[in-house]
Image (cartoon, coloured by chain):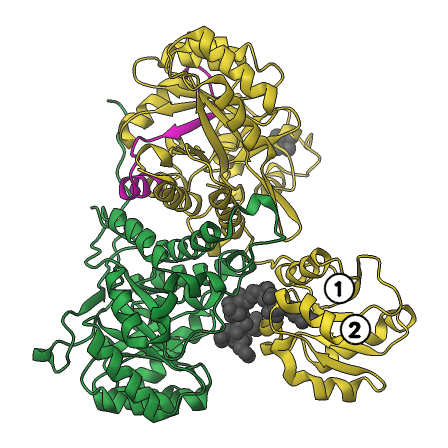
Chain colours: A yellow, B green
Amino acid sequence: MALTGLQIYKLLPQTNCKECGFPTCLAFAMKLAAKQAELSACPTVSEEAKAQLEAASAPPIRLITVSGDGHRIEVGNETVLFRHEKTFYHPPGLFVRVRDTQPPDEVRRMAAQVEGYSVDYVGTALSLDGVAVEAASGEAGRFAEAVAAVRAETRRPLILMSRDAAILEAGLTKVSGSVPLLYAADGANWQAMAALAKRAKLPLACHAIGLAALANLVEQVKGTGVEDLVLDPGPRDFTSSLAALTQIRRLAVKKNFRLLGYPVITFPGESATDVVEEGLLASQHAGKYAGFIVLDRFSPELAYALLVLRQNIYTDPQKPIQVQPGIYEINSPTPESPVLVTTNFSITYFAVANEVAGAGRPAWLLIVDAEGMSVLTAWAAGKFDAARIAKAVQTSSLAEKVNHRRLVIPGYVAVLSGELEEALPGWEVLVGPREAIDLPGFLKLRW
Amino acid sequence: MPVTVEIPKEKWAGKVREITLGATPEQGGTRTRTVTVGGETTLPFLHFEGSIPHPPAIALEVTSRPPEDWPGLLREVWGEVALDPAQWAQAVEVRGADLVLLTLNLEDTPDQARQVVRQVLAATGLPLLVFGPGQADKDNELLVAVAEDAKGERLVLGTCEDKNYRTIVAAALAHGHLVNARSPMDVNLAKQLNILIHDMGLPMDRLIMDPTTGALGYGLEYGYSVMERLRLAALAGDAMTQQPMLVSPNEEVWKAKEAKVAEGVPAAWGNLAERAVTWETMTAAALIQAGADIVTVRHPETVRRVRVLVSRLMEA
Ligand code: B12
Ligand code: SF4
């Protein structure tokens, strides 16, 4: 929890020596509280005060980074329980698990699938984050081979899974240059695991059943100097995992309980009987507080839905995703090509642009500044009316780009057509279909 | 052990109202069973903190006329029965829905609306929701006729919006029905509509609120957060937000390209049939996690899947 200026002042030397560049310690403390200065500017602050100040300014949930070559994922650093309170910052990593007991071909195929999976959603490429490799065989050699096989297919981040530090270490020889997550320390192995994590400078997951046992394990592991931790509180089913993840989030964010202030890893496949159930549980974890989600089953349909859900939940509620207003060219339009009008809400823009682009039809897309709202929302809010559209047409260079004077407006705002024709003398307004899917057919017929 | 952890529990002052849909013969209707929703004393499925007395209910949609504007996939899965609302309602019951949502058509006359509601009531013992075609005047005309004719059934009449709630609420009030009050994704508007309806004298155990939703990928997050906020307000004790919530993936999902198009889409989208059901299921699932008490859907496989979710979430 952030300290006030006065609380910070009490921790400073209070000598007003001005070395920090401020006239008094109090002035410096105020700047620190406002995050407009760095503590390091004071040369005389005690180590103890420094530690206290750093602990107090640390985020309630530690940011953990896992990386491969050219890919990294950061999770944690969340500050709220509900997205409307501010926003959720770091979407959970989506990983797919392979086991070293699976045939090597299958391991490679699954890794390649993760590597190759990508979908476009409102102009962003969404992809899976990496692969978890589990040493189910209990043999260091086999595990290392499986890790190498996965690495040959993908350079995305990895999670290495075994309860035996020596086996994990064998796997680590195959991942040089990357920062995998080690899974997991438990009540029995934590010394060896913590030593490995410390030596290799890697984040470490801690597994214990129950929050008290987990907090104690974390305390022990932290005591060895390992700071980057991930939590596995144990439950695998829907309601117990919801309870555990909610409790951990509440403790971290509302009680500032440091020992559980880390991202949580979940394994929705372990209690699920099929891909449907696994997907449902993974979707729960995506909305309710997971930092890493390790899937056992993969289907493109499920991956797509989960990636979009994750994106939706982690969208900043204060800022609708928008595109720049203006004229967009689709498939190299000519002066004869149609002019399509819509709003600058990203989802709307891409729904229309993708449809027209996908059908191979050239068009000019005139994007009106509707403050990032969908067609009907903007219309209902008075941000997509005849006056705004007319102004967008008049202030753009549209009239020079096309040799006709016809506009297509979205079918949902058919009511605007009369008014718009009045506001734009010389232009003819065509009412398009309601859904963008029907645009190519409409253009074929009417243009 | 040195460290102890106190499980953080909220002490909520409020509770969601319990509402029963449908009426048996003893209660003045003809339903063979009723469905009760609401009654939560904590956030969705936090059994460690409060009680979740009733599972969310799943409604399958049936249309009064063959649903020509539905995507091909849906028309195929229902096949012939979709030509006859009564047979369709029976099929809905067989497919395991808790409720039947009957949507009337813009072309229906009041007489036809009465007829089709009668047929559906005769064909199934499930409680019924009857929604108009979504045009205020037409909704009023049809729903008033239906309310009168099906007196005492505790139908859910929808959809009441700020522009037409008066007529529909009056009809519900006079003939023993419930209403679904829909507002456009805004906590204050939802609350305000509840107050207006309350002020007309409708008992609050006959009012379901519908904060509107978007499909996965098409505005889902707005509705999701409005529902979370409404539920938090209800639990904090705001009496005018304590209604169970209904949301309609059926109306949103099947407009999305993901649920409609088989050809010419990226391979990463997978195949249409599975994708479409996944889209409807995931939309409904997210809304249930945000506090939905009733979800309305179109595909029978969605019902099976959402049922899996609901039964897992009810395991205390
Ligand atoms: C999400 C949402 C919101 C979000 C805003 C999201 C955003 N950034 O726009 C929030 C919660 C903020 C919101 C607010 C409001 N909303 Co709103 N909202 C919706 C919702 C659920 C989904 C909108 C959406 O994202 N659709 C997806 C996009 C892609 O659709 P689209 O832009 O229409 O694009 C499609 C088509 O139009 C077409 N298309 C687009 N461009 C073009 C161009 C051409 C040429 C063609 C041919 C086709 C075409 O292709 C696209 C895909 O098919 C709708 C209900 C619904 N299901 O539609 C209500 C809805 C649009 N909202 C509505 C209302 C009333 C409001 C408010 C006024 C409520 C209020 N008083 O607070 C406010 C207004 C905003 C404000 N004052 O701040 C009403 C509008 C009713 C009406 N007909 O007037 C709706 C329909 C809900 C309802 N049934 O009551 N809303
Ligand atoms: S440098 Fe440190 S001790 Fe000196 S004035 Fe600044 S805060 Fe105070």
Say whether mark 2 and mark 1 are on the same chain: yes
| Disc 1 and disc 2 in contact, CB within 8 angstroms | yes
Q: Is residue B299 visible?
A: yes
Classify residue B42 as left or right of residue B250: left
Say if B316 sits above or below A74 in the image.
Answer: below
Q: Which residue is mark 1?
A: A325
Q: Which residue is mark 2?
A: A392
Residue type indicated by callout 1: Pro
Mark 1 lies on a secondary structure that is loop
Which residues are the magenta region? Answer: A223-245
Q: Quadrant of residue B66?
A: bottom left
Residue type indicated by callout 2: Ala
Q: Quadrant of residue A36?
A: top right
Q: Give the total of numbered labels.
A: 2
Based on the picture, tell me whether residue A413 belongs to the magenta stretch.
Answer: no
Nearer the N terminus, badge 1 or badge 2? 1
Q: Position of residue B254 (x, y in %)?
A: 48, 64
Based on the picture, tell me whether residue A235 belongs to the magenta stretch.
Answer: yes
Say if B124 sits above or below A190 in the image.
Answer: below
The residue under the point 15% across, 79% down is B30
Say if B13 sits above or below A264 in the image.
Answer: below
B251, A169: nearer the viewer: B251
Seen as rendered, the residue at the extreme left is: B26
Mark 2 lies on a secondary structure that is helix
The residue under the point 45% across, 68% down is B251
Spatial CA distance of label 1 from label 2 is: 9 Å
Seen as rendered, the residue at the extreme front is: B80
